[in-house]
Image: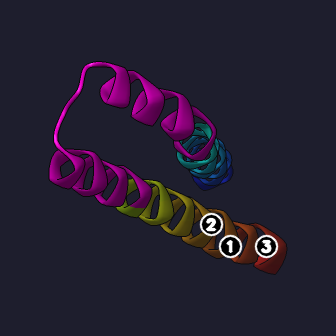
Amino acid sequence: MTNDKTLIQMIWGIALVAAGIGIFFAMPQKVVQLQQMQVSSFFINFTRFSFYLIAVLLIGGGARKIYENYQKRDSK
């Protein structure tokens, strides 16, 4: 059972990393949309900072989850 749980956790980590990378690729398009809506520059910069921070946290958390579960899988 623990081997299945480790595999599921590794897949979840990969999904987190993929979501973080997806934010990095989608963000420039969203900023252009915000600029077309004539939103204030403060709001654009705050939104950009917030989403990039979320992306970094997703990638970091996913990478950590992958690393830890890979270590568990190798030790068995």
Residue at horizontal 58 percent and vertical 47 percent from the top: 24
Query: Residue furthest toward the right?
Result: 74
Query: Residue 1: where, in percent of width, then height?
Result: 59, 46
Query: Residue 4: where, in percent of width, then height?
Result: 64, 43
- Per the image, label 3 sits on a secondary structure element best described as loop
Query: Residue 38: where, in percent of width, then height?
Result: 23, 26
Instruction: Kindly indicate whether the residue at mark 3 contacts the one at mark 2 (C-beta within 8 angstroms).
Output: no
Query: Residue 75: where, in percent of width, then height?
Result: 78, 80
Residue at horizontal 58 percent and vertical 52 percent from the top: 13
Q: Horizontally, is 60 left or right of 43 in the view?
A: right
Amino acid type at circle 1 is: Tyr
Q: Where does label 1 land, which residue?
A: 67
Q: Horizontally, is 43 left or right of 64 in the view?
A: left
Tell which of 24 and 71 is nearer to you. 24
**Dominant secondary-structure state across the stretch colored magenta:** helix
Tell which of 10 and 35 is nearer to you. 35
Q: Is residue 64 above or below residue 42?
A: below
| Mark 3 Cα shell of 10 Å, populated few (<14), some (14-19), many (≥20) | few
Tell which of 34 and 21 is nearer to you. 34
In the image, which residues are magenta? 23-52
Q: Hey, which quadrant is residue 40 in on the image?
A: top left
Give the distance between the C-alpha atoms of the residues marked 2 and 3, in whole angstroms: 20 Å
The label number, if any, that marks residue 20 in the structure image = none
| Mark 2 Cα shell of 10 Å, populated few (<14), some (14-19), many (≥20) | some
Q: Where does label 2 land, which residue?
A: 63
Mark 2 or mark 3: which comes first in sequence?
Answer: 2
Instruction: Kindly indicate whether the residue at mark 1 contacts the one at mark 2 (C-beta within 8 angstroms).
Output: yes
Q: Where does label 3 land, which residue?
A: 76
Residue at horizontal 37 percent and vertical 63 percent from the top: 53
